[in-house]
Amino acid sequence: MRRLEGRLAVVTGAGNGIGRASALRFAAEGANVAILDMEEEGLSATAEKAREAGAKVLAITADCTDEQVVTDAFKRIYAEAGFIDILMNNVGQSARERASEFYASSSEVWRFTLNVSLMSTLIASRQVVPSMREAGRGKIVNVASNAGMAGEIGLSEYAAAKMGVIGFTRSLARELAPFKVNVNAVCPGVTKTRVIERISDEILEQIRKSIPLGFFAEPEDIAATAAFLASDDSRYMTGQSVVVDGGRWMI
Ligand SMILES: NC(=O)c1ccc[n+]([C@@H]2O[C@H](COP(=O)([O-])OP(=O)(O)OC[C@H]3O[C@@H](n4cnc5c(N)ncnc54)[C@H](O)[C@@H]3O)[C@@H](O)[C@H]2O)c1
């Protein structure tokens, strides 16, 4: 399928995992990609693979929580590549090794998680919304999580941030619907990126047992949904949060 032929897609956090798989899927579907990440090495590897898939690639090393850095990066994208058809807000993470139950948590860790998992989405979206409104077209795909739906012990601020992304998705979708801009979210469950290397085998096995389909997602499973939400195949969907978690959370 080449549903994104000639489109320009921006993917944040494309140096690894779900962001890389999505940038490569977009490229395979005919899009040119502008990719952002704070880790230069992973970003270059994604850029090389996307070029091999035939895409024009603009790779920019940037911390997506820094508004000025992101503003400068998008100025460069508009100048060098033109109108942005698709924005995938993929940057996000839990506090990882600093995560703890709430009673032992600190505001420093909350701020870090809210910045990387929620503010980054607002900051990048603000860069594309004016031009999408003006053009009367565009797709925004936010990466949320299933974390806030069932609730996760030890991940309260991450769950809050990701449910924030869902609320933002719904509200922005209403604001942009009159301009034919679709705004949706994908909510992955446990996905086999470097993130799960930190989780013990025992806990992973417990989680696996709670998944009806009985296995963890590959990043490409999430990328497939992102590509659908970035394409005209989803033109009649907006404000949705599509859960891709092997059936762990059923709506
Ligand atoms: N892996 C999972 O199980 C899972 C589950 C649910 C949701 N998610 C969400 O999916 C998204 C991607 O997760 P992943 O597992 O692919 O992570 P990952 O760590 O494999 O990749 C994330 C990428 O984002 C980059 N990044 C992090 N902070 C950044 C910043 N401030 N500025 C620029 N780049 C930054 C990292 O350098 C990395 O290349 C995140 O929003 C995450 O919360 C992941």
Image (spheres, rainbow, N blue to C red):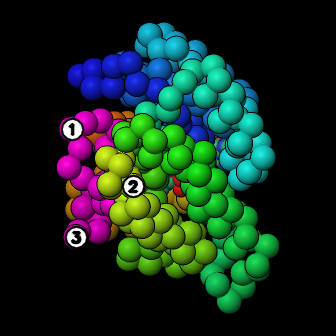
Mark 1 element type: helix
Q: Of the numbered discs in the image, which one, if any, rests on residue 176? A: 2
Q: Earlier in the sequence, mark 1 or mark 3?
A: 1
Residue drawn at 59 percent across, 62 percent down: 118
Q: Which SS type dominates the magenta stretch?
A: loop
Residue 77, percent from left and from top = 62, 28
Question: In the picture, residue 112 is in which quadrant?
Answer: bottom right
- The crowd level at tag 1 (other Cα within 10 Å; few <14, some 14-19, many 20+) is few
Q: Earlier in the sequence, mark 2 or mark 1?
A: 2
Q: Of the numbered discs in the image, which one, if any, rests on residue 251? A: 3
Quarter placement of the N terminus: top left
Residue 117 visible within the image: no
Horizontal relation, residue 224 to residue 168: left or right: left
Type of amino acid at the residue the image marks with label 2: Leu
Quarter placement of the C terminus: bottom left
Type of amino acid at the residue the image marks with label 1: Asp
Q: Nearer the viewer, mark 3 or mark 2?
A: 2
Numbered-mark total: 3
- Residue identified by numbered label 1: 233
